[in-house]
Image (cartoon, rainbow, N blue to C red):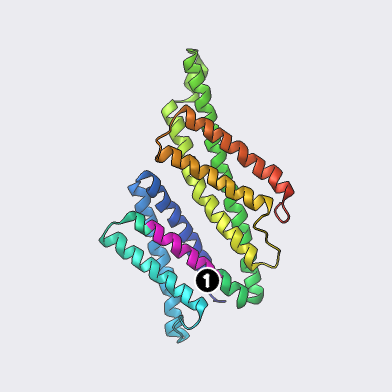
């Protein structure tokens, strides 16, 4: 583990990107995203198999003798099964949900080993997890901001069309359909990033020496932000809401995001 910390970090990175691809396919039926996710997951399997073989052939230790090693082998089994299912049966949603579980198992294995076995390097790994947590959360907020801007542009364009103000602003704002679609795509990208950021943040809270509170204002606020944008996706995909109504909802969701970032962040016990 000490010699292959970079392998674990790369596995988590590729695994996270693969989940984002499968999530995009899940909500959009996007075959290109599915193919990219499949190859990313194949790279995850290759790296996992590489580490597994080093344990068996070099260290002569099959990693199933402890609970922590068993979690790693369990994650490898889940990836193996999902790749076979994806290739043989094309049950895409099963692959997506299986890999959500696999990612969580892999994350639990990594952080548990860091907490129990790695000492100084484990502390470094946990601190790196915090950096990734914050970075992913900020990137997701960036996507939500873009989505909000597209929604505001949609509402402004909609108002100009209703008032029949045929001027240069009307044409420079862009097509209503494209503005609505781009706003939707930005949310699709932001939601899985925020979810992974929250998972990493909670995991960091449990394995670090800092005190972690589930009822902390920023923790609860981040969960509520995620819930609000999940509701947006449900309204959009399941209920079929589009256009002005969903743009208004998206604008309100972004205002809640700002409240969470500035107000809840200032009230938090351990967030900035």
Helix, strand or loop at label 1? It is: helix
Q: Residues within 10 Å of mark 1 (few under 14, many from 20)?
A: many
Above or below, comparing residue 28 to residue 152 in the picture:
below
Residue at coordinates 66% horizontally, 70% vertically from top-left? 123
Question: Is 41 positioned to the left or the right of 115 in the image?
Answer: left
Residue drawn at 53 percent across, 35 percent down: 250
Residue that appears at 61% across and 41% down: 257
**Residue 160 in view:** yes
Q: Position of residue 75 (x, y in %)?
A: 44, 69
Foreground residue among 198 and 135: 198
Q: Is residue 97 above or below residue 51?
A: above
Q: Is residue 9 magenta?
A: no
| Magenta region, main secondary structure | helix
Check disc 1 and report the residue beneath it. 109
- Identify the magenta region: 96-110
Report x, y in % for residue 35.
34, 53
Asked if 53 appears above or below 89 in the picture, the reply is below
Farthest bottom residue in view: 60
Q: Quadrant of residue 38?
A: bottom left
- State which quadrant residue 258 falls in: top right
* Number of residue marks: 1
Reply above or below: 22 against 126: above
């Amino acid at each position: 583990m000490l010699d292959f910390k970079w392998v674990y970090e790369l596995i988590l990175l590729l695994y996270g990107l693969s989940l984002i691809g499968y999530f995009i396919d899940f909500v959009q039926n996007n075959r290109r995203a599915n193919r990219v996710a499949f190859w990313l997951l194949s790279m995850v399997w290759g790296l996992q198999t590489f580490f597994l073989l080093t344990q068996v052939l070099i260290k002569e230790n099959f990693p199933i003798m402890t609970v922590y090693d068993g979690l790693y082998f369990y994650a490898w089994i889940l990836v193996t099964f999902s790749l076979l299912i994806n290739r043989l049966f094309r049950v895409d949603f099963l692959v997506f949900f299986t890999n959500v579980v696999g990612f969580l198992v892999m994350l639990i294995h990594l952080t548990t080993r860091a907490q129990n076995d790695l000492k100084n390097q484990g502390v470094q790994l946990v601190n790196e997890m915090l950096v990734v947590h914050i970075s992913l959360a900020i990137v997701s907020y960036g996507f939500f901001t873009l989505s909000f801007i597209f929604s505001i542009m949609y509402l402004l364009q909609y108002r100009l069309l209703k008032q029949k103000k045929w001027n240069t602003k009307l044409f420079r704002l862009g097509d209503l359909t494209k503005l609505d679609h781009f706003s939707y795509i930005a949310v699709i990208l932001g939601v899985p990033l925020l979810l992974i950021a929250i998972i990493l943040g909670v995991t960091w809270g449990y394995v670090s020496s800092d005190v972690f509170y589930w009822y902390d204002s920023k923790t609860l606020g981040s969960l509520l932000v995620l819930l609000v944008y999940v509701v947006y996706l449900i309204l959009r995909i399941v209920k079929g809401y589009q256009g002005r109504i969903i743009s208004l909802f998206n604008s309100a969701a972004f205002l809640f995001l700002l409240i969470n970032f500035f107000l809840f962040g200032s009230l938090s016990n351990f967030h900035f």
